[in-house]
Amino acid sequence: MEVKVTIEYDDAEVAESVARAVSPENSETYQDLSVKTTFNKKKVVTRIRSSEFRTFVATIDDLLFSIATAEKAVAGLTNLCV
């Protein structure tokens, strides 16, 4: 199974910050799992591959949670700097 998750932001710096925050998730440590996150301008793109259904779904869930957390952190930092 493979999925490509693309999220577009209004600001390229936010996209880069989110991508860098979740990039530690990039992994090929498991035989059946591959996760790769990149950013390009205002888009964050993550590709997930796994042969195990539970691993696949759990990884997507983890990714979305991590992205939401990164977005909140970036928003909080932005508010502090204003």
Image: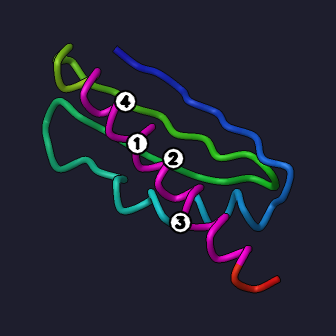
Residue positioned 77% across, 67% down in the render:
13
Q: Which residue in the rendered view is the most extreme toward the bottom?
A: 81
Task: Name the spot of residue 38 as percent of width and height, x first.
Answer: 58, 52
Mark 4 → mark 1, Cα distance in angstroms? 9 Å
Task: Name the spot of residue 54 as percent of width and height, x first.
Answer: 17, 18
Q: Earlier in the sequence, mark 3 or mark 2?
A: 3
Q: Earlier in the sequence, mark 3 or mark 1?
A: 3
> Which residue is disc 4 drawn over?
60
In this rendering, the answer to whether 60 lies above or below 23 is above
Mark 4 → mark 2, Cα distance in angstroms? 12 Å
Name the front one of labels 4 and 1: 1
> Which residue is disc 1 drawn over?
65
Q: Amino acid at mark 3?
A: Arg
What crowding class fits label 2: few (fewer than 14 Cα within 10 Å), some (14-19), or many (20 or more)?
Answer: few
Task: Name the spot of residue 51 as percent of width and height, x first.
Answer: 21, 18
Mark 3 → mark 1, Cα distance in angstroms? 15 Å
What crowding class fits label 3: few (fewer than 14 Cα within 10 Å), some (14-19), or many (20 or more)?
Answer: some
> Which residue is disc 3 drawn over?
20
Element under label 4?
helix
